[in-house]
Amino acid sequence: MNRIKEVLEEKGIKQKWLAEQLGKSYNMVNGYVQNRQQPRLEVLYKIARILGVNPKDLLKEDLND
């Protein structure tokens, strides 16, 4: 699970803009945002760099472990 949606909302950034910055389709980014699919680690780091956050800020802790 990731927090990409929450970080985008906090920063007032649209999914379409993030998709353009990543060079990915809107549908791909929407899949990340809706947690239907998870980005590869290198993509997660790129998203963090684009959004100006620590990659850890994009991850949710699983409190069930």
Image (tube, rainbow, N blue to C red):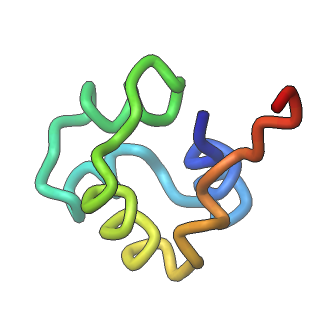
Quarter of the figure with residue 37: top left
* Image x and y of residue 16, in percent: 33, 45
Which residue occupies the foreground of this view, 10 or 3?
Answer: 3
At 77% from the left and 36% from the top, the residue drawn is: 62
User: Which quadrant holds the C terminus?
Assistant: top right
Q: Residue furthest front?
A: 65
Q: Residue at x 58, y 77 (%)?
A: 54
Q: Is residue 64 left or right of residue 6?
A: right
Q: Position of residue 45 (x, y in %)?
A: 37, 68
* Residue 55 as seen in the image, left or right of residue 45: right
Percent of width and height locating residue 42: 26, 61
Left or right of 45, for residue 6: right
Q: Residue at x 56, y 48 (%)?
A: 4
In the image, residue 42 sits, relative to residue 35, either above or below, namely: below
User: In front here: 14 or 49?
Assistant: 49
Q: Please tell me whether residue 63 is drawn above or below residue 21 in the rendered image.
A: above
Point out residue 40 in the picture as x, y percentages from the top left corner: 28, 46
In which quadrant is the N terminus drawn? top right
